[in-house]
Image (cartoon, helix red, strand yellow):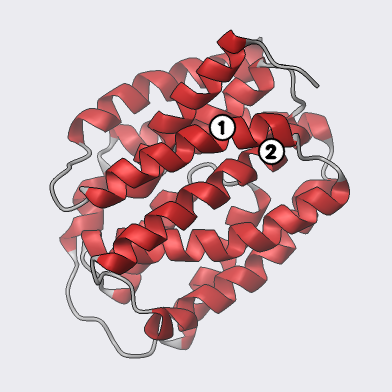
Amino acid sequence: MEISLLNASLLIIAGLFAGFINTLAGSGSLITLPLLMTLGLTPHQANATNRVAIFFQNAVAVRNFKQQGLINYKSSLFLVVPALIGSVVGATFAVNINEDILKLFIGSLLFVMFFVILLKPDRWVKAQAGQVNEKPAVWQIIIFFFIGVYGGFIQAGVGFFLLAGLVLGVGYDLIKANAIKVLIVLCYTGVALGIFIWSGQVNFLYGLILAVGNASGAFIASKYAQQIGVKYIRIILLATVFVAGIKVLFF
């Protein structure tokens, strides 16, 4: 399969922006999913191919956050494992769902996340950061299982749910929560990607080109996470999500 220079450039630019947003907050896939479908992939193929870029993006971010001392693999295991198990359920469901339903789900999600972003979720995400227990409670483990189900099913928007769970549910501050978030996403994305590859739905050429952009964006964001804010990113994301939602649902 061949790809034009213009389409390759679009994938890298969109990936750069998505990787940056995904690492600092979430919902970068709301940009890359519509683009992949615009370039000719079916909703199933776009959902599967996007995971290639997500995997490399989070591998780069985890490395940088680890070097900054923001990730402890041992303490994170209690949250990673339930999300990992949930992702298997979600990815398996995504492989078998009707294509028209998947397209409707992605388009509807774009508009739902538009209003979530519009209401400035960063305010309530930061509000209760504080005490962190050594081991999460059972209800916290259950929450991360269902977040894993959603993340395995469709990547778009999972970052906000993870941040909410890590900050409001567990008690991490926003910077540490972002670091743990990318570790969780890296682990369950590896499993979900394996399922999508086995199903034959991954376009590796598009996925690897997109990964160049995602990984670059993740490197920048994770390298300077403690100096960069998301205020202006959200303004751009609002416009992008709105336009993308209209395109997916109506065009």
Where is residue 74 shown, x and y percent of the image?
Answer: 42, 86
The amino acid marked with disc number 2 is Thr
Q: Going by the image, does 196 lie left or right of 154?
A: right
Q: Quadrant of residue 109?
A: top right
For this orientation, the residue located farthest to the bottom is: 134
Instruction: Say whether disc 1 or disc 2 marks the residue closer to the N-terminus.
Output: 2
Q: Residue 49 shows which numbered tag?
A: 2
Where is residue 6 shown, x and y percent of the image?
Answer: 57, 9
Is 49 located above or below residue 70 in the figure?
A: above
Where is residue 127 shown, x and y percent of the image?
Answer: 17, 60
Q: Going by the image, does 88 lie left or right of 219?
A: right
Where is residue 121 shown, x and y percent of the image?
Answer: 28, 45
Q: Residue 210 shows which numbered tag?
A: 1
Q: Residue 34 shows which numbered tag?
A: none
- Say whether marks 1 and 2 touch (CB < 8 Å): yes
The residue at 25%/50% (across/down) is 223
